[in-house]
Image: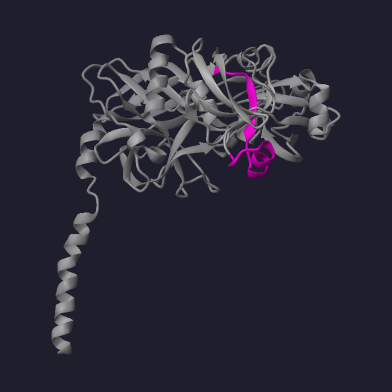
């Protein structure tokens, strides 16, 4: 009897194996069909003549070149090359990629699937969403099909095509780990999180669903090593396409603006404000002359809904406001003194990336910071005697983790009391990295800021 049972068990395993294999996804057709529309992007930043004191530290591969530079005077840096990916969205040569792939470069070369190499011009880029639109002169190019990221479900299979480390048309697959994910300093993008293997060179490449539709633009990873660790993030394609259309039509992206500083509503705060659960965006500051102030928004208001859409987390508000057309009217549902009320507001326009994003017209300094002087009320609230309030952070400052709403107290243990003093300390440091003492809420912390 035992012999028959073992024979039956063996036969069951043999018969079951093909069934299990058939349940696994087959990406061959999807990859073959879409690979021709995916491109490899190579960028070059030409040599720059820089003052010796401000020259960035060269990479190891340029060490020999650095040693041959005279010790005084000016230094010439060799050209730098970068790589990324992109995909063709129209047959006449428009290509979508990441802004960080093509920003601050002098030449962009696109290598097509048929091995042709064509120079591209940057139509426009938007650092807030990390989306760029470039154009090559060609006709009848293969294009991708655009999908709907709103239909994505956690756990479904997705596939990426790109050029990690320059290996063109590399295909990797995984599943959707989460949708609507928020990342630090990324207020305008509800990221798609996946476990698809994405590495340097994949940036700007497409993320496909199993229908062969592009649902995202691969943009970021979270890693302690610099390489893939299972956490990849893609910009939803509807967000990217909206940015691309605006860049194509106007060369820039227009976003709505309220003019408030907000924070998350914790369970303790919700209880103290009389809310049944933590939700919404708590207003901690209203900019003078802003659309919010004109509409009557007050400090301590909790914005619960924007044009009927629920604000579950404070990060939801910037996305909804940013997607609104400047000049349009919106309805805010706010919680004030333990009662709900509605406020009508005319949406303002967010200044362009290259302009100051602040209450006045404070310039953006060399680290990418827009700051303003502290008021007496702010000094009391943050419990500091001096410092400057961060209105906006981009570039090196954003990479260091400095956020709008932070108070910069000192640079390399030297106190900061004004925007001019901050710029002087950054310029005079003579170092490629400085220690920034930041006051954030009720705590202080040091952040290393790299100036190169």
Q: Residue at x 70, y 14 (%)?
A: 288
Tell me if 33 is positioned left or right of 372 in this view. left
Q: Which one is in front, 250 or 341?
A: 341
423 in magenta: no
Q: Which one is in front, 413 or 417?
A: 417
Q: Residue at x 58, y 20 (%)?
A: 48
Is residue 203 visible in this depiction of the protein? yes
Residue most toward the front? 339
Q: Is residue 185 above or below residue 175?
A: above
Q: Which one is in front, 10 or 326?
A: 326
264 in magenta: yes
Where does the magenta region start and end? Answer: 257-278
Is residue 452 visible in this depiction of the protein? no
Tell me if 26 is positioned left or right of 324 in this view. left
Give the quadrant of residue 370.
Answer: top right
Residue most toward the right? 385
Q: Position of residue 83 (x, y in %)?
A: 43, 32
Q: Is residue 417 above or below residue 5?
A: above
Give the quadrant of residue 166.
Answer: top left
Q: Position of residue 400 (x, y in %)?
A: 64, 35
Q: Position of residue 344 (x, y in %)?
A: 55, 16
């Amino acid at each position: 009897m035992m012999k028959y049972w073992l024979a039956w068990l063996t036969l069951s395993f043999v018969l079951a194996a093909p069934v299990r294999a058939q349940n696994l996804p087959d990406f061959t057709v999807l990859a073959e069909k879409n690979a021709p529309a995916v491109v490899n992007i190579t960028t070059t930043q030409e040599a720059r003549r820089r003052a010796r004191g401000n020259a960035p530290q060269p990479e190891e591969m340029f060490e020999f070149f650095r040693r041959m530079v005279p010790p005084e005077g000016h230094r010439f840096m060799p050209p730098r090359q970068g790589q990324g990916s992109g995909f063709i969205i129209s047959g006449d040569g428009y290509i979508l990629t990441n802004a960080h792939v093509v920003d601050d470069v002098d030449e962009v070369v696109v290598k097509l699937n048929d091995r042709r190499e064509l120079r591209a011009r940057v139509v426009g880029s938007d650092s807030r969403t990390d989306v760029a639109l470039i154009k090559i002169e060609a006709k009848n190019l293969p294009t991708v099909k655009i999908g709907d990221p709103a239909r994505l479900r956690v756990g479904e299979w997705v596939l990426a095509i790109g050029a990690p480390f320059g290996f063109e048309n590399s295909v990797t697959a995984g599943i959707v780990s989460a949708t609507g994910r928020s990342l630090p300093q990324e207020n305008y993008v509800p990221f798609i999180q996946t476990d698809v293997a994405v590495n340097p060179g994949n940036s700007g490449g497409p993320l496909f669903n199993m229908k062969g539709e592009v649902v995202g633009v691969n943009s970021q990873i979270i890693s302690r090593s610099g390489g893939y660790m299972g956490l990849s993030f893609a910009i939803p394609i509807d967000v990217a396409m909206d940015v691309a259309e605006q860049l194509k039509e106007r060369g820039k992206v227009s976003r709505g603006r309220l003019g408030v500083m907000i924070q998350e509503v914790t369970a303790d705060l919700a209880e103290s404000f009389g809310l049944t659960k933590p939700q919404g965006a708590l207003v901690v500051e209203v900019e003078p002359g802003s659309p919010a102030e004109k509409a009557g928004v007050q400090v301590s208001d909790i914005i619960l809904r924007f044009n009927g859409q629920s604000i579950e987390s404070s990060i939801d508000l910037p996305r909804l406001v940013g997607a609104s057309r400047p000049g349009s009217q919106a309805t805010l549902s706010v919680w004030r003194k333990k009662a709900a009320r509605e406020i009508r507001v005319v949406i303002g326009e967010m200044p362009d990336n290259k302009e100051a994003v602040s209450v006045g017209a404070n310039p953006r300094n060399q680290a990418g910071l827009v700051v303003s002087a502290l008021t007496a009320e702010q000094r009391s609230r943050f419990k500091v005697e001096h410092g400057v309030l961060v209105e906006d952070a981009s570039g090196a400052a954003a990479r260091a983790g400095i956020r709008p709403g932070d108070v910069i107290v000192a640079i390399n243990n030297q106190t900061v009391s004004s925007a001019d003093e901050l710029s002087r300390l950054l310029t005079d440091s003579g170092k490629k990295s400085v220690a920034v003492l930041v006051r954030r809420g009720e705590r202080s912390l040091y952040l290393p800021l790299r100036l190169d």
